[in-house]
């Protein structure tokens, strides 16, 4: 079931609402990818201007 997309930030209001209903994030194969090179994982969240984010990894989506 596709319930729409949300921002990659874990503290996004819509994402929190959907988690309350038991939905889990999935990678969208049609969404554009953004590559950001940083010295640390924390630098990614800082570069995007928000708190913890979901990122695509070799093992699926992961919180960074």
Image (tube, grey):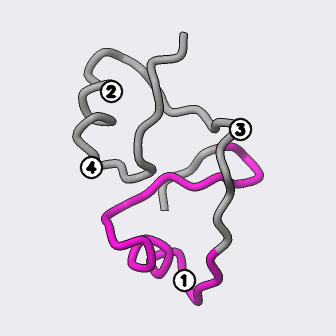
Q: Mark 4 points at which residue?
A: 11
Query: Residue 21: image x %, image y %?
Result: 30, 15
Q: Give the range drawn in magenta.
A: 36-60
Query: Residue 8: image x %, image y %?
Result: 45, 50
At 50% from the left and 74% from the top, the residue drawn is: 44
- Up-down relation of residue 57 to residue 15 (above or below): below
Q: How far apart are marks 4 and 3 (CA)?
A: 23 Å
Q: Residue 61 carries which label?
A: none
What is the crowding at mark 1: few (fewer than 14 residues within 10 Å), some, or many (at least 20)? few
Q: How far apart are marks 2 and 4 (CA)?
A: 11 Å
Q: Mark 3 points at which residue?
A: 30
Q: How far apart are marks 2 and 3 (CA)?
A: 22 Å
- Up-down relation of residue 40 to residue 54 (above or below): below
At 33% from the left and 26% from the top, the residue drawn is: 19
Mark 2 or mark 1, which is nearer the start of the sequence? 2
Mark 4 or mark 2, which is nearer the start of the sequence? 4
Q: Across the whole image, how many numbered discs are drawn on residues?
A: 4
Q: Which of marks 2 and 3 is in front?
A: 3
Q: Residue 19 carries which label?
A: 2
Q: Do the residues labelled 3 and 1 touch (CB within 8 Å)?
A: no
- Quarter occupied by residue 1: top right
Mark 3 or mark 2, which is nearer the start of the sequence? 2
Q: Do the residues labelled 2 and 4 touch (CB within 8 Å)?
A: no
Q: Is residue 37 part of the magenta span, yes or no?
A: yes
Q: Mark 1 points at which residue?
A: 40
Q: Do the residues labelled 4 and 3 touch (CB within 8 Å)?
A: no
Q: Nearer the viewer, mark 1 or mark 4?
A: 4
Mark 3 or mark 4, which is nearer the start of the sequence? 4
- Up-down relation of residue 30 to residue 35 (above or below): above
């Amino acid at each position: 079931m596709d319930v729409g997309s949300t921002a990659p930030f874990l503290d996004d209001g819509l994402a929190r609402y959907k988690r309350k209903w038991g939905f889990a994030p999935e990678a969208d194969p049609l969404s554009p990818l953004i590559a950001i090179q940083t010295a640390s994982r924390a630098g990614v969240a800082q570069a995007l201007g928000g708190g913890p984010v979901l990122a695509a990894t070799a093992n699926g989506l992961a919180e960074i």
